[in-house]
């Protein structure tokens, strides 16, 4: 299997050097380029076609959010992970709406960063636990404010949710916390592959597109509660 090709984007050279050093010795991951601002990031992404972009937010010329939006729109096979010191609500939501599949803070461990890179390539999302809580709270708020559908249409428009098994409910609750497959496996004493199968089943039963959509669907249908 070919190495995961990563583009680093940060306006501080020392940060880029640090990330390069961390990733240099990780098997299966290769840093293919570095950019010091969002405009350069978009140009390099077009030229290099990386698998993953680690994207800072506050940068000159073009910020990380519009750069993420450009890259995700033009290069759907490239996954963007925002790596920043900022966890304010507006930046979190804008970054995710721009198409980022991950949102990590710069105090994340090297192991967390590596797992996030590998995870987004596998089709997972990886969000810092504190940030995940903000996102899910917002999803729940929006779900609560959504207007009810007319009764005459509800039976046709609303998907039929297949009941989850007790173990699937356990996995779903940990998905709500923003945990990765590896972390859920450790919590439930199951292998990462087993958790992956559970997640796939949950997504199918909830008729969702991905993990995030599954969580939103679960919140809307009252299958989980953020207070649990």
Image (cartoon, rainbow, N blue to C red):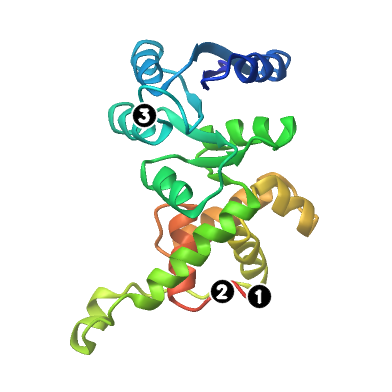
| Above or below: residue 149 compared with residue 215 | below
Which residue sits at x=44%, y=65%? 139
Q: Quadrant of residue 46?
A: top left
Q: Which residue is mark 2?
A: 224
- Secondary element type, mark 3: helix
Q: Are marks 1 and 3 in contact (CB under 8 Å)?
A: no
Tell me which numbered mark, 3 or 2, is placed earlier along the sequence: 3
Q: The C terminus appears in which quarter of the rendering?
A: bottom right
Label placed on residue 228 = 1
Q: How many marks?
A: 3
User: CA–CA distance between discs 1 and 3?
Assistant: 36 Å
Residue wearing tag 3: 67
Disc 3 to disc 2, C-alpha distance: 34 Å
Quarter holding the N terminus? top right
Q: Residues within 10 Å of mark 1 (few under 14, many from 20)?
A: few
Q: Residue at x 28, y 82 (%)?
A: 148
Indicate the position of residue 127 as horizontal and vertical percent values: 58, 47
């Amino acid at each position: 299997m070919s190495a995961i090709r990563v583009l680093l984007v940060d306006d501080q050279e020392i940060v880029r050097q640090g990330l390069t050093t961390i990733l240099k010795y990780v098997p299966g991951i290769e840093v293919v380029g570095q950019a010091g601002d969002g405009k350069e990031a978009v140009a390099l992404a077009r030229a290099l076609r990386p698998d993953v972009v680690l994207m800072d937010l506050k940068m000159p010329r073009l910020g990380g959010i519009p750069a993420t939006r450009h890259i995700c729109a033009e290069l759907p096979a490239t996954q963007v992970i925002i790596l920043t010191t900022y966890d304010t609500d507006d930046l979190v939501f804008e970054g995710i709406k721009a198409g980022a599949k991950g949102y990590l803070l710069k105090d994340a461990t090297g192991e967390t960063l590596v797992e996030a890179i590998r995870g987004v390539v596998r089709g997972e999302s990886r969000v810092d636990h504190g940030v995940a809580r903000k996102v899910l709270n917002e999803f729940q708020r929006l779900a609560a404010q959504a207007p009810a559908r007319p009764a005459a249409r509800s039976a046709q428009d609303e998907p039929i949710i297949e009941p989850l098994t007790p173990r699937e409910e356990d996995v779903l609750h940990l998905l709500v916390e923003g945990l990765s497959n590896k972390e859920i496996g450790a919590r439930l004493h199951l292998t990462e592959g087993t958790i992956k199968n559970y997640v796939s089943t949950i997504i199918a039963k909830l008729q969702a597109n991905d993990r995030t959509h599954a969580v939103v669907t679960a919140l809307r249908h009252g299958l989980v509660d953020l207070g649990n």
